């Protein structure tokens, strides 16, 4: 299997790093495009993969071609590479806002197309990616795409109608979590803890709590109740969060993000 990347920015780099760590393919089975000499040299040095300034070269090389360019450039890129693609290659898009139907109109109705929505924790091997394949992919094709994205995190096959919800709960949500970590650390600093140490405590608490949800299979409410002793410190803090409308604020924020994605 040969994998190509149009674009070699942070997300493409996270994917390439994950693929190589998991040894899905060898470095000489990957090619990425980059427009500047600095980007080409960086990719060569960091990953030892093939790098080219020619998008068509990558398209003709790849069995799976990942489009890692901003949506504003996507139409221009597709016009450039459409007739260079292998007949049976899988085209994977990372771009928000471009639908499977839009790609089919640009590349043809028989083309295998996958729309994805990864998030930035992919940079540390803990990404979450929604995968939306069109009807032209076989089960083996879909598993191949899942294997690629699982090399740097978790995946879920998702209906395209849910992609904006994925943006709200996963694609954009690292920003909410960073804000939460920062606020907890600020409170610790207010009470006298050094800031560097406060970030470690807050961040590890979030990481460990998330792992408990994923690995125990318990409802988050049940896990919350396990921490809340009668008349204790934790339930006192939970009471304040409820009084301040914590849950409602989070729900409103996610809903606003989804609505923005849907153009509402």
Image: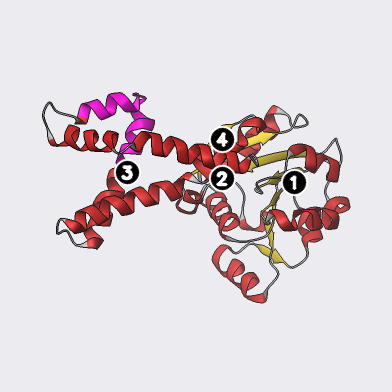
Separation of residues labelled 3 and 4 (CA atoms): 22 Å
Separation of residues labelled 3 and 1 (CA atoms): 38 Å
Separation of residues labelled 4 and 1 (CA atoms): 30 Å
Residue 140 relative to residue 88: left or right: left
* Local secondary structure at mark 1: loop
User: Mark 3 or mark 1, which has the lower sequence index?
Assistant: 1
Residue 141 relative to residue 199: left or right: right
For this rendering, which residue is in front, 259 or 214? 259
Separation of residues labelled 2 and 1 (CA atoms): 21 Å
Residue tagged by mark 3?
A: 206
Residue tagged by mark 2?
A: 118
Vertical relation: 263 (above or below) 15: above
Place of residue 47 in the rendered image (x, y in percent of width and height, measured from the top left): 57, 62
Magenta segment, prevailing SS (helix, strand or loop): helix
Residue at 21% x, 27% y is: 226
Between label 2 and label 1, give the one nearer the viewer: 2
Residue 55 relative to residue 213: left or right: right
Residue tagged by mark 1?
A: 63
Residue at 79% x, 57% y is: 77
Residue tagged by mark 4?
A: 165
Residue segment shown in magenta: 206-226
User: Mark 4 or mark 1, which has the lower sequence index?
Assistant: 1
Residue at 54% x, 54% y is: 14
């Amino acid at each position: 299997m040969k994998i190509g990347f149009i674009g070699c920015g942070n997300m493409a780099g996270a994917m390439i790093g994950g693929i190589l760590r998991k040894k899905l393919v060898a470095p000489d089975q990957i090619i990425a495009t980059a427009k500047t000499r600095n980007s080409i040299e960086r990719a060569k040095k960091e990953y030892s993969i093939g790098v080219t300034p020619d998008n068509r070269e990558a398209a003709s090389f790849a069995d799976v071609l990942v489009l890692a360019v901003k949506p504003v450039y996507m139409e221009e890129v597709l016009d450039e590479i459409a007739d260079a693609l292998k007949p049976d290659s899988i085209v994977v898009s990372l771009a928000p806002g471009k639908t499977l139907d839009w790609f089919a109109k640009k590349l043809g109705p028989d083309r295998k197309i996958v729309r994805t929505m990864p998030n930035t924790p992919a940079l540390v091997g803990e990404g979450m990616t929604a995968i939306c394949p069109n009807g032209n992919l076989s089960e083996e094709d879909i598993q191949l795409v899942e294997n690629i994205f699982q090399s740097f995190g978790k995946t879920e096959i998702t209906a395209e109608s849910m992609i904006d919800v994925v943006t709200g709960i996963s694609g954009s949500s690292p920003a909410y979590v960073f804000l939460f970590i920062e606020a907890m650390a600020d409170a610790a600093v207010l009470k006298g803890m050094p800031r560097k140490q406060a970030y470690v405590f807050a961040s590890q608490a979030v990481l460990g709590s998330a792992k408990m949800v994923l690995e125990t299979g318990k409802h988050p409410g049940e896990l919350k109740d396990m921490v809340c002793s009668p008349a204790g410190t934790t339930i006192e803090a939970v009471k304040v969060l409820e009084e301040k409308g914590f849950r409602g604020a989070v729900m409103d924020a996610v809903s606003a993000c989804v609505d923005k994605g849907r153009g509402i």
